[in-house]
Image (cartoon, rainbow, N blue to C red):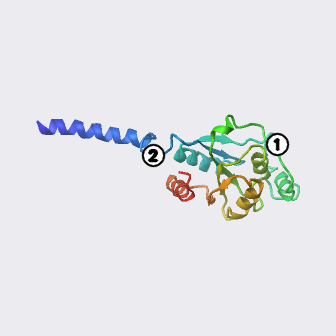
Amino acid sequence: MKRKIIIPVLAAAAILAVVLAASNIGRGDVGERHILVAYFSATGNTKAVAETAATVLHADLFRITAEEPYTDADLGHGADARVTREQADPASRPAIKNRVDNWEQYDTIVIGYPIWGGDAPRIISTFVESYDFTGKKVAVFCTSGSSGVEDSQENLRALLPDAEFRPGIRFDTNATVADVRAWAAEAGIG
C-alpha cells in the first residue's frame, strides 16, 4: 500500500523539479532584470553561441542585420574584399537594417560578434553608436579560432564610456551551455 502512494508522489516530485528547473523560479532576480543578447553573424558561428547565451540568460535575442548583406566574396581575405576594406577604415560604419524595439527596458546588453582582422566587425561599431548605453551593463563575446576578445572589447569600451563593462570572453564555435553559464556568472550577468 505504501509503495502505491510513494511511487506517484516521487513521480510528481520529479515532474515538479523539471518544471521548476525550466522556469525562472529559484533563479535570483531574473524577473527584475532585462537582458538583450545582440549579435552579428555572417556565417552562423556567432549565431549559435548567441542563441545559447540567450537561453542561459533568459534574454531576448536580436540579430544585427546588415542593410547590405555580406556575400562570400565580401568575406574573403584579399585586399578587394569588403571585410578587408571596412576593417582597414576605423571610421567605417556599415548600415544596419533593423532596430531594437523598447531599448529602454534593457539594463544588460550582451554583444556577440566574430573577429575580423583582429577586431569586432565595423557593423558592431554602428550598433553601439546607435543607442544610448548610459548606465547599462555591457558584456561582449567573440567567436574566433585564435584571436582573443581583449582588443575588440577595449575598442568598444572607448565607444561606450558611460556603460558598465563586464569581462568579455572568446568562445569557439562549439561553446556549451556550461561554458556560457560559467562566463555569465564570472561576468556578473547571469
Tell me what residue is drawn at x 83 percent, y 48 percent: 93
**Residue 188 shown left or right of residue 158 in the figure:** left
Can you give x and y, in whole percent of width and height, for residue 91 in the image? 87, 53
Residue 144 drawn above or below residue 126: below
Kindly report which numbered mark, 1 or 2, lies closer to the viewer in this rendering.
2
Determine which quarter of the picture holds residue 89: bottom right
Can you give x and y, in whole percent of width and height, for residue 63 in the image? 68, 42
- Residue type, mark 2 in image: Arg
**Residue 6 shown left or right of residue 137 in the figure:** left
Can you give x and y, in whole percent of width and height, for residue 79 in the image? 88, 59
* Mark 2 residue crowding within 10 angstroms, few (<14) / some (14–19) / many (20+): few
Q: Quadrant of the N terminus?
A: top left
Q: CA distance from mark 1 to mark 2?
A: 38 Å
Q: Label 2, on which residue? A: 27
Callout 2: SS: loop
Nearer to the camera, 34 or 49: 34
Can you give x and y, in whole percent of width and height, for residue 113 in the image? 69, 52
Disc 1 and disc 2 in contact, CB within 8 angstroms = no
- Residue type, mark 1 in image: Ala
Tell me what residue is drawn at x 69 percent, y 52 percent: 163
Q: Label 1, on which residue? A: 95
> Which of the marked residues, 1 or 2, is nearer the chain's N terminus?
2
Nearer to the camera, 45 or 153: 153
Determine which quarter of the picture holds residue 102: top right
Callout 1: SS: loop
